Image (cartoon, rainbow, N blue to C red):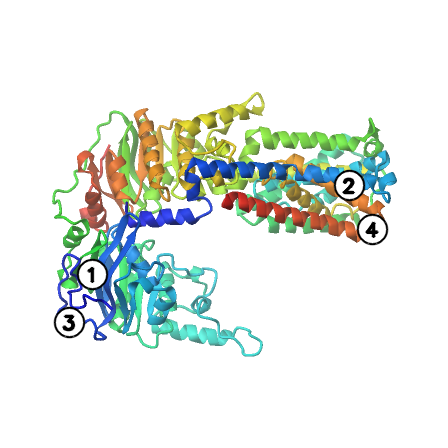
Amino acid sequence: MTVEQTDESAQSAGSAQGQASAEGIQPDARSGMQSSLLYNVERFALPSLLILVLIFFSVWPKTGSLFASAANFQEVGSDYVYIGMLALASLLPLVCGEFDFSVGSNAGFTQIVAATAMARFHVPLPFAIMLAIAFGAAVGLGNGNTVSRVGVNSLIVTLGTSAILLGVVEWYTGSQSINIGISPSLVNFGSERTFGVPDMCYLLLGVALVVYYVLQHTPYGRYLSSVGSNPRAARLVGLQVDRLKLTAFVLAGALAGVAGVLLVAKNGSATPEAGSVTDTLQALAACYLGATSIRPGRFNVPGAMLAVYFIGFSVSGLAIAGVQSWVSQVFSGAALFIAVVVSTVIGRRRAGGA
Amino acid sequence: MVSASAENPGAGGNVVPALAGDPALGEPLVPRPWFALSVWHVSKNFPGTKALDDVSIDVTRGTIHCLLGANGSGKSSLIKILAGVYRADPGGTVTVESDTIDADRTSPEWARSSGLHFVHQDLAIFNSLSVAENLAIGRGFPVHALTKAIRWRALRRHARTVLQRFDVDVDPRRLVAELRPSGRTMVAIARALQDQSDASEGVLVLDEPTVSLPAAEVDILFDALKRYARAGQTIVFVTHRLDEVVRLADRVTVLRDGRVAATLEASEVTNEKLVELIVGRALDHDIAASSVLDGEDLVLEVSDLSAGSLRQVSFGLRRGEVLGVAGLVGSGRTTLLTTLFGVQPPVHGTVKLDGSPVSFSGVDQAMDAGLGFVPEDRSESAFVNMSLRENLSAAEVPKYWRGLRLRERAEAADARQSIVDFSIKAISERQPFATLSGGNQQKAIVARWLRRRPKLLLLDEPTQGVDVEARGEIYRLVRQAVASGSSVIVVTSDFEELARVSDRVVVLTRGRITGEVRGPDIDPSRLTELVLSAAPDSDESRLEASQP
């Protein structure tokens, strides 16, 4: 045993990762029990909150009659499909440790692509949808290449992309909406219901299931989380870190393309104002909020979807109660803020304390 | 003050030759301006270890005094006591100039105020700031009295004066990142000494400043240090490179096992003598036999491999053999492993695996060929926010991809098996990796590769920051793998450990293989001797390693 070794073990004992106390079984087991209780409380905090919100606005006399109606549920359901889709798009880069700040603007861009294809070039609906997705994916390819090949911070790259897309949309449309020539079947899809549930909700559910499957049940999803957890270690277990990041951005772009089509379906038109940075922020907020539950500490699909509708129903309830619209904004901001603070504190306690 | 003040300073050590013409010897109570720094009877015990045992050293003003010793000799403990990071056991004293303090009461503040200035291996220099800003950091920027804005012109003027004084020929406005490596070290030195009014004031302590410097840069740095010393600057230079001592030192103190082995004058210093003092016994004069391995059963044949700091490295590795690599930080030992693992391509040379040449353009190809790599730093191997299960299977995820699903149940069962097989202490395989102790994390990472039954496992400092028990277990696991046919290359600075686990050890010095020891000849002091005494820069003395 040499002195240097003493130093090292002393240092590692002090670090969060190498808690000396975890050596014996006893303290380990105890801290594990504590954290597993905490873990479960944390896991179901967001679903419980969602249920509480639903109950509260249904019983509150001021909102009850309007809030607890099928019409309101249908409206909130379809209104937030678009944000839900953006959240799914944001999720993939987030899982591998990168930001995509351009998903909202990308949706705004691809709605114009889809609408223009139908209105100006009379492209049949399926091809218009494919075009929108392809354009979205191309934007993602640009983002991904700049991030992974050149190594620029993804926040900066995608902020730039976002601004460029907004500008391009304004230039191309001359700030005019595209109202005429939209495929009626697309518009119908935006408003029709099956078994009382808006069709768009089924689409969101379907895409969410696919993304969940990809992230949770395929090696690709595991690789993305590994890259997000520790890119250098990921490289040393043979993962192509750059390529994985690139694909995450491309998929995010493609999903933003789907979101763009949903915008046209919902609004029956393509308006340059739709699809904005605010939408991106809401989607990112949902992802972060969702990361505090179901699988705490990790970005996950069910959590993000719950978060989207937690915000959706809360905002709807507040609106029915007659609060001014700025309150809703403050509410979703505050929800994100509190969720992230709480999960950071709990996460730190779990990693370091015990 | 010291009770045994009349004693010879080296009474506890082995030899301390009296300094010629030293009038102060034997009169330690009188202020001794002769010595800029005196360490008297300093001891330091760690639980179970005696890091320093009655160490006394006098450093004469205006000289370069080297402090030399192997890993664990106590030199870093001594430096930490001087810097106030550690406190020594009660009893000794430290004197800087005429400022004496009990050795158990040193503190960073005291070190600063008494005139001890430290420049550590990582220079704590900010690459993205200018030279002038770097000089001002920690000292304070000159600011405008009213607006508190930085007075840039005054800052640059000060920087220019300081740089001139230390003979550093750079524009203070340049970014440190643009300087050559020796320039950065010199800026760090200038920063440490800038407030001395006079060169003969204070003591500059350099703690292994040359570890990551190329040879040409070392020359530039040494010229500068000699100039400073001539101007009256006292310099304590900590190193474990003998050639540096021979070139630089006015006097050298060798530490061994926490004691002063000897203090020598420059005229008495020879490479051999230093090695004897460091290792503690006479030198073996027979040079390590360079062995030629026969072609049979060679898993790995490396010939003429150059990459990064590696220069024409050649060696072979048999099936079921543990090959140790002994070398200092910066010897190219990590480059050797990462190059074999396909992290970066070799510049030159060939690698044969099972007799057929391979060239990996990525880690995945190396893994397909049966290689595994445990990096030196756990931050390059651990997925701390993922579960133990996911960490264990990180290198074989596709194995669980069956019928369009990741079979998590099978993965969990394997993880539980690994927890037993590799004696990982964990409550469950679902446990977040961050909540495991360092030793258990490391066991899991070694297990990650052993599960794949690697043909060749590369271990870089596999027991760094790991407790003694886990250390033993890790090597037991490695031994098991070897028994079932894996071959292992292990790099570690702990020569005792290297001696215990290796069948054969090659010595790597500044990118070249300079020696080889096998079987019964492997012992820690022999390895220390070989690592320290190799003279890598002259090609004649280079020993050819095993040529397959």
Report the residue marked by disc 4. A323
Q: Residues within 10 Å of mark 3 (few under 14, many from 20)?
A: few
Question: Above or below — where is A147 with respect to B268?
Answer: above
Report the residue marked by disc 2. A313
Distance from Cα at disc 3 to Cα at disc 1: 17 Å
Q: Residues within 10 Å of mark 4 (few under 14, many from 20)?
A: few
Using the image, name the chain to which the residue with label 3 belongs.
B
Distance from Cα at disc 2 to Cα at disc 3: 88 Å
Secondary element under disc 2, as helix, strand or loop, is: helix
Residue B91 % position (x, y) = 25, 62
Using the image, name the chain to which the residue with label 2 belongs.
A
Secondary element under disc 4, as helix, strand or loop, is: loop
The amino acid pointed to by label 2 is: Phe
Residue A38 % position (x, y) = 59, 39
Q: Earlier in the sequence, mark 3 or mark 1?
A: 3
Same chain under badges 2 and 3? The reply is: no
Using the image, name the chain to which the residue with label 4 belongs.
A
Q: Quadrant of the N terminus of chain B?
A: bottom left
Using the image, name the chain to which the residue with label 1 belongs.
B
The answer to which image quadrant residue B81 occupies is: bottom left
Instruction: Give the side of residue B87 with respect to residue A210, left or right.
Output: left
Report the residue marked by disc 3. B22
How many numbered callouts?
A: 4
Secondary element under disc 3, as helix, strand or loop, is: loop
Q: Residue furthest top?
A: B403
- Foreground mark, 4 or 1, reads 4
Report the residue marked by disc 1. B252
Residue nearest the observer in this picture, A147 or B275:
B275
Distance from Cα at disc 1 to Cα at disc 2: 77 Å
